[in-house]
């Protein structure tokens, strides 16, 4: 296996690892008892969508990481920071059951994704495009988080 393929696998695994860590704080009885927006998808949708997004994110980060290091330092750093905010959201929302703090986190997360997407696009148009579904999903998640905060 060449180094490029190994790097691709490592980026995808890193993104999946963020999902695994986040899932440690998964929904439980507390979440089930909450009032939710009528637009909230069935619970089965979330792991399916997130797994697809984590693969797309990993491919995007890999594509950027293959470029000249001088131009990739900030975008890769932002990508890693937003992964941290992604994990933090699960902890705040499900772990400590604080939709208010999670809402603040997810707004920051969305902003970091937007900036990362923009920087990725400037370096590699495909990498930027691969981040757009993630940006959209987290935007929808802001609405869902706000709805839970507002309804409860």
Image (cartoon, helix red, strand yellow):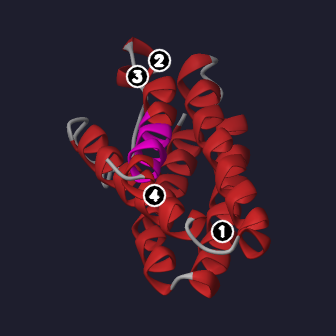
Badge 3 or badge 1: first in the primary sequence: 3
Badge 4 or badge 1: first in the primary sequence: 4
Cβ atoms under marks 4 and 3 closer than 8 Å:
no
Magenta residues span 7-16
According to the picture, the residue beneath numbered tag 4 turns out to be 57
x and y percent of residue 103 in the render? 66, 45
In the image, 39 versus 3, the foreground residue is: 3
Distance between mark 2 and mark 1 Cα atoms: 26 Å
Task: Please state which of the two labelled residues, at mark 2 or mark 1, is closer to the viewer.
Answer: 1
Q: Which label was assigned to residue 24? A: 2
x and y percent of residue 121 in the render? 57, 83
Q: Give the dominant element type of the magenta stretch: helix, strand or loop.
A: helix
So how many labels did they put on this image?
4
According to the picture, the residue beneath numbered tag 1 turns out to be 116
Circle 4 SS class: helix
Q: Which label was assigned to residue 27? A: 3
């Amino acid at each position: 296996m060449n180094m490029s393929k190994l790097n691709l696998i490592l980026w995808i695994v890193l993104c999946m690892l963020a999902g695994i860590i986040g899932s440690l704080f998964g929904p439980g009885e507390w979440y089930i008892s909450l009032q939710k927006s009528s637009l909230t998808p069935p619970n089965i949708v979330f792991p399916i969508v997130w797994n697809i997004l984590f693969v797309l994110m990993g491919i995007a980060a890999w594509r950027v990481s293959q470029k000249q290091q001088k131009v990739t330092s900030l975008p890769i750093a932002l990508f890693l920071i937003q992964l941290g905010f992604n994990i933090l959201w699960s902890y705040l929302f499900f772990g400590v059951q604080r939709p208010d703090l999670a809402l603040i986190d997810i707004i920051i997360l969305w902003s970091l994704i937007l900036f990362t997407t923009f920087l990725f696009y400037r370096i590699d148009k495909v990498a930027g495009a691969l981040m757009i579904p993630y940006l959209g999903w987290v935007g929808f998640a802001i609405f869902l988080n706000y709805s839970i905060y507002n309804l409860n």
